[in-house]
Amino acid sequence: MFIPYGRQDINEQDISNVIDVLKSDYITQGPAINRFEEAFAQKIGANYAFALNSATSALHIACLSLGVEKGDIVWTSPISFVASSNCALYIGAKVDFVDIDLKTFNMSIDALKEKLEEADKNGNLPKVIIPVHLCGTPCDMEEIKKLSEQYGFKIIEDASHAVGARYKDSYIGNCEYSDITVFSFHPVKIMTTGEGGMVFTNDKDISKKLELYRSHGVTRDTELMEWDTEGPWYYQQVALGFNYRMTDIQAALGLSQLERLDEFVTKRNELVEYYKNKLEDLPVSIQEISPDKYSSFHLLVINIENDSDRKAVFENLRSANIGVNVHYIPIHLQPYYKSLGFQEGDFPNAERYYKKAITLPLYPNLKLTEIDFIIEQLKKNIL
Ligand SMILES: *Cc1c(COP(=O)(O)O)cnc(C)c1O
């Protein structure tokens, strides 16, 4: 049997909650959306939450809501999914990257400081920085927040991996160290709505913009209108928005999954502990996690630290029906980004990490005997 690198966990209760919405009056733009948003905002400790059809959409309108415009500069990590930087390109902004730290796999704070100093001198500071909590392990947000105050940039946390993760004892998403936080509910992530995402903010003005951009830039809120309402039917388009809405069918699944979020994250942490004990004797390194962070472990990435051929290890594990993967190919080395002027050698840590990285299977229903089998096959191939 094939062991995938990740998969959703949907139970009978989740299914029955979705069926209830299917039998109700509203399958989209109904009450399940509000319930999902309110429950999540409350759990995470953020003032505002908006459900969306994906984290990609969420990142796009997060940039717009922070005022990113054509020609502005946005920085993120080169080791992420392409959506983390594409969001800025959609708007015509310029993207640049901050190299990673080889211990945490996240954006390096030292590299960030250096790059900011230089950008300050050259007069090309970023408007927004998008730290990515890789594998569900939070970045050093306190440091990034301090730098944002010093240099005047805004922060969007790409927490697509970090749903249910904690930083300094609070849930990621409470926006204590950022302007906006984004979650993904794709099925391989921590909890799912099929496709889906959510944005959080504590700022009322930003929340109004997020809400507008999610739905065509159209409002029925008289406070947001450019002139007086013409009657109870009246709406106005006051911005150029999109249809990035989530359906109530999805929200019902999300609300149901939210109740199981902590259980999912605990299970992932238990499985990683089991993995870690077995990985100790192997020539591999894993992400370093400081005590102020509790990872949600969307992914378990190992770096092969001897001279084994990563490609051969990968292929042999796949032949043994183990769905290993690689997260991620550095974004700046994608053909599209190379065509923008990036090249090999631009972010050496990210490139080194990529050459050694393999993602091992990890999801709540993964069995310990399956981990034993994965370790056995890994040993065979890298010792
Ligand atoms: C999955 C992912 C996204 C995009 O999420 P979707 O919900 O699939 O749009 C963005 N950033 C990161 C880091 C991701 O892993």
Image (cartoon, grey):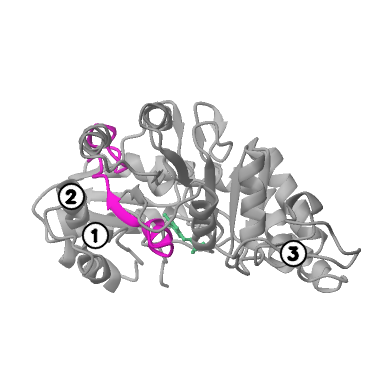
Residue 311 falls within the magenta-colored stretch: no
Write down the residue under mark 2. 347
Earlier in the chain: of badge 2 and badge 3, it is 3
- The quadrant the N terminus occupies is bottom left
Closer to us: 94 or 28: 94
Amino acid type assigned to the residue bearing label 3 in the image = Gln
Write down the residue under mark 3. 236
- What's the residue at 52%, 35% (across, down)? 166
Measured in 3D between alpha carbons, the distance from the residue under mark 1 to the one under mark 3, in whole angstroms, is: 40 Å
Residue 349: mark = none
Q: Nearer the viewer, mark 2 or mark 3?
A: 3
Of all residues shown, which one is farthest toward the front? 227
Write down the residue under mark 1. 332
Q: Is mark 3 within 8 Å of ligand 1?
A: no
Task: Report x, y in % for residue 155.
Answer: 45, 40
Q: Secondary structure at mark 3?
A: strand
The segment highlighted magenta reads: 84-111
Amino acid type assigned to the residue bearing label 1 in the image = His
**Which quadrant of the view contains residue 147?**
top left
Task: Report x, y in % for residue 54.
Answer: 55, 63
**Which quadrant of the view contains residue 362?**
bottom left
- What's the residue at 48%, 53% (across, down)? 63
CB within 8 Å, label 1 to label 2? yes
- Count the marks: 3
